[in-house]
Image: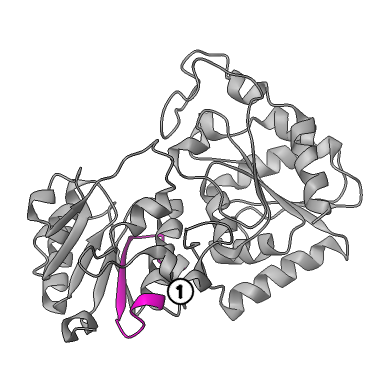
Amino acid sequence: MPAASARAVLLIQTAFIGDVILATALLEYLHQTQPGTPVDFLVRKGNESLLLGHPHVRRVLVWDKKQDKYRGLWRLLRQIRQAHYGRVVTLQRFASTGFLTAFSGAPERVGFHKNPFAWGFTRAVPHVIGDGRHEVARNLALLYHEESGMRNDENSSFLIPGSSLTRPRLYPTDTDESAAALAAARAEGRPYICVAPTSVWFTKQFPEEQWLKLLAALPAQYTVFLLGGPPDAAACAQLLARSARPHVVNLAGQLSLVASAALMRGAVLNYVNDSAPMHLCSAVDAPTCAVYCSTVPAFGFGPLSSFARVVEVPHVLECRPCGLHGYKACPLGHFRCAHDIQTQQLLAVLAEAERQ
């Protein structure tokens, strides 16, 4: 390996929680292919806890986008240039992170060709949504070296079984594991199911009435944990208040993201939307039932756990998908992509999970 390769790598992903989780696949890849190379990771403020204690991250850089955004960007650029990275890789297609990459001073500056600052990259990689590739595969393409012939399938020990993808991975700390164990104890010895019912986007979120149908139909032997962050606590409390089912526990806002992932790992099944909790499941290989409403798995952001099933409307809707990220309301007002999903579809996944 050339001496220059020992210089540190900086990965940049300052988007949302799920995007950072998917980007951790690159940490696994780098650890396997270049184990002696230090790796730093730049995230937006609020997402740094995802990488706390991560064994393959030397240092986490944080950009506060809400306060002093652009002055903070200049400070980050100075910090990046002073670090003398050997390679800077942005996983985003936005100008701000492209700016940091293009002017980083690194000998290798890599990003997607759609980035406005791609002209300043030493290598620009195509990013195509809908071509059948997962976002993890699109991101991993940023690390391949055409001159060395390096390919993801050369190190099968860290691949998803039956796939050519490296799975994203989070590493719960002892504190996370303890918090998850205390939460699991509230099941009082019963097997448990986790439900993460919310999403930032309305059209990505399975409606409350639909979740209530599922809660009423789930077998009685299960404890159900409702999961989410502090902003989701009220919605989960309302779901709990409206459900007549016993043994439902609202944990929203009580666990860190990684502690939630540790709890989900021990569930018989996790019901999630096309949102961050789905990616938490992928990162700890937790059994997953992903409910897709307005979006579709073909966009390349689907679940990656060993047991992962997608539930979506069982018939074709001409209006679906209506957008890549979802909307604050159904553009046509009927939201059939969510309301036409049958509870039995969700129960069938549970029956399959129970047989595993």
Res 43 → quadrant:
bottom left
Res 261 → quadrant:
bottom right
**Residue 35 on the magenta segment:** yes
Disc 1 marks a residue whose amino acid type is Leu
| Residue 334 vertical placement versus 9 (above, below) | above
**Front one among 68 and 80:** 80
**Front one among 31 and 328:** 31
Residue 23 on image: x %, y %: 39, 60
Residues drawn in magenta: 32-49
Residue that appears at 40% across and 70% down: 29
Residue 147 on image: x %, y %: 20, 67
| Residue 9 vertical placement versus 195 (above, below) | below
| Residue 154 vertical placement versus 313 (above, below) | below
> Helix, strand, or loop for circle 1?
loop
Looking at this view, name the residue that lies furthest to the right: 220
Would you say residue 105 is visible in this rendering?
yes
Would you say residue 69 is visible in this rendering?
no
The quadrant of the rendering that contains the N terminus is bottom left
The quadrant of the rendering that contains the C terminus is bottom right
**Mark 1: few, some, or many residues within 10 Å (few <14, many ≥20)?**
some
**Residue 238 on the magenta segment:** no
Q: Which residue is mark 1?
A: 52
Would you say 97 lies left or right of 151 here?
A: left
Residue that appears at 69% across and 38% down: 238
